[in-house]
Amino acid sequence: MESDGVRLAVFERGDRSAPTVLLVHGYPDTHRVWDGVAEALAGEFHVVSYDVRGAGRSGAPRGLAAYRLPVLGRDLVAVARAVSPDAPVHVVGHDWGSIQAWEAVTTPGAPIASYTSISGPCLDHVGHRMRGGANPEQLRRSWYIAAFHLPFVAPLVWRYLVGPRWGAVLRRAEGVSAPVSPTVVEDGVRGMALYRANFIPRLRAPRVRRTDVPVQLVHPRHDRYVTESLTRGVERWVPNLKRRVVDAGHWAPVTHADTVARLVAEHVTDSRTA
């Protein structure tokens, strides 16, 4: 399918007549990061995932403007309407998938029935929170974001040092054997546009982003990149909120797929019976 002129690769499992769960991956992953979760959910739900623009089998437009949050939010909504034209979807996002999903969830009229966010806060919410002072521990963990803003250097390091060894890097640093796309080198370079297009503008001038959608925040207790402090005070913007903690690291959808699937299923069921 297409969104804003970009081809998006969409993948479906399960019964199309069942409630639709839409899974959105992060950086530098593809839809494959959800394989275990999708398999666990497919017996009960219509499970959909897609490669976000710039990753995997999807199109890769040039320029930072093509990777700004409003565009990413429109991609999600376009996929949701294409795969579930008659009912809102239940969104699950991880890492950058979670960050961009917040854009859609906080857009009035988006066809979203519930949202599960894993390791990816709303950047606007973070921007408002940082006006009261940044968390030093979170700043320390976010060193890579500053690195991604380095012109020439960051793409070269990824292309020739990190990207070709990404599977080994994950195993050594995280103890994770995650699916690594054959496109990971190019995906990693292109995906830096997500950070460059959005972090500074959103933190400098955060917008008001509210939602009445039922939201479940899942925090992996051992996440090396995202601290729970980034979501403190989110109740100000999200009145229908519940929090869950899992004994996992950042790649919880891979290492704890059954646990993540159970939490998603429970949240979907709760939102449908509320």
Image (cartoon, helix red, strand yellow):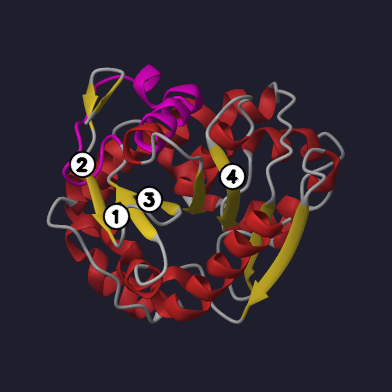
- Label 1 secondary element: helix
Q: Percent from the top left, x then y, of residue 135?
A: 77, 52
Give the residue drawn at x 54%, y 65%.
264
| Residue that carries the numbered disc 4 in the rendered image | 113
Q: CA distance from mark 4 to mark 1?
A: 21 Å
Disc 4 packing (10 Å; few <14; some 14–19; many ≥20) = many
Residue that badge 3 annotates: 27
In the picture, the quarter occupied by the N terminus is top left
- In the rendered structure, which segment of residues is drawn in magenta? 53-80
Task: Kindly identify which numbered label has been placed on residue 9.
Answer: 2
Q: Where residue 119 sits: x, y (%)?
A: 57, 58
Say which quadrant the C terminus sits in.
Answer: bottom right
Q: On the rendered structure, is 187 left or right of 221?
A: left
- Nearest the viewer among 266 and 251 is 266
Q: Earlier in the sequence, mark 4 or mark 3?
A: 3
**Distance of label 1 from label 3 (alpha carbons):** 11 Å
Nearer-the-camera pick, 69 or 223:
69
User: Which residue carries the number 1 mark?
Assistant: 31
- Name the side, left or right, on which 160 lies relative to 242: left
Q: Measured from the top left, where is residue 224 in percent x and y?
A: 56, 67
Q: Amino acid at mark 4?
A: Ala
Q: What residue lies at 48% left-to-right and 40% top-to-bottom?
A: 87
Tell me which numbered mark, 4 or 1, is placed earlier along the sequence.
1
